[in-house]
Image (cartoon, rainbow, N blue to C red):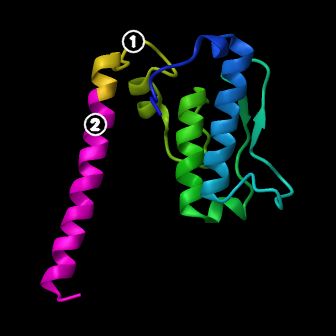
Amino acid sequence: MDIWTVEPQYLAPDDLRLQVNLFAQGLARWAGFCRPEDDFYPVSRSDDGIGYRLEPLTEEQSRNPRAQKMWQLLASLAGEPQNPMYPDVSLLGELLGTTSDEDALTDELLVRFFRLVRLVRVLRHELGRDEEKEKGL
């Protein structure tokens, strides 16, 4: 699947908001919140903005470091103001261009950034394999 192409039939703002919300909900479930058994969903659908609203995690949800990090990422993408419960997310939002265009990476640099992330992940994987070989695992 080409992650950069958006099919013409999905270019309407309401369709884009729905897709954004579905991805945000999926990421939230992976991180341990917004699961079907949860009483409280910090990520809820919105018919305006980028497609979702974000509320602070519950005390129980915020004990999970993965949930905190995903919440921070989703807050940054939504351009949410800094929440005192969590570290500042404005830097990421500024670089991604979700809170301001002033310091946003160009599309070309954003692609390079994602490529850098991919290369770092591959390198870490390979280094882990080398360590396992050295230990005789």
- The image quarter in which residue 47 lies: top right
Pointer 2: what residue? 115
In the image, is residue 35 above or below residue 78?
Answer: below
Q: Decide which of 73, 21 is in the foreground and name it.
A: 21
Q: Nearer the viewer, residue 111 or 94?
A: 111
Q: Secondary structure at mark 2?
A: helix
Say above or below: 78 vs 43.
Answer: above
Percent x, y of residue 81: 60, 30
From this view, report whether residue 14 is shown above or below residue 65: above
* Foreground pick, 75 / 16: 16
Q: CA distance from mark 2 to mark 1?
A: 23 Å
Q: Secondary structure at mark 1?
A: loop
Quarter holding the C terminus?
bottom left
Please provide percent x and percent y for residue 122. 26, 54
Q: Nearer the viewer, mark 2 or mark 1?
A: 2
Residue located 61% across and 30% down the image: 80
Ranked by sequence position, the earlier of labels 2 and 1 is 1
Q: Is residue 49 visible?
A: no
Residue at 30 percent of width and 53 percent of height: 121
Magenta segment boundaries in residue numbering: 112-137
- Please indicate whether residue 32 sits to the left or right of residue 113 in the image: right
Q: Position of residue 85 (x, y in %)?
A: 62, 49
Tell me if residue 53 is in the magenta stretch: no
Residue at the far front in the pictured view: 1
> Mark 1 highlights which residue?
102
Q: Single out the residue that lies furthest toward the right.
A: 39
**Whether residue 68 can be seen here:** yes
Residue at the far bottom: name it. 136
- The amino acid at mark 1 is Glu
Is residue 121 found inside the magenta-colored segment of the image?
Answer: yes
For the stretch drawn in magenta, the main secondary structure is helix
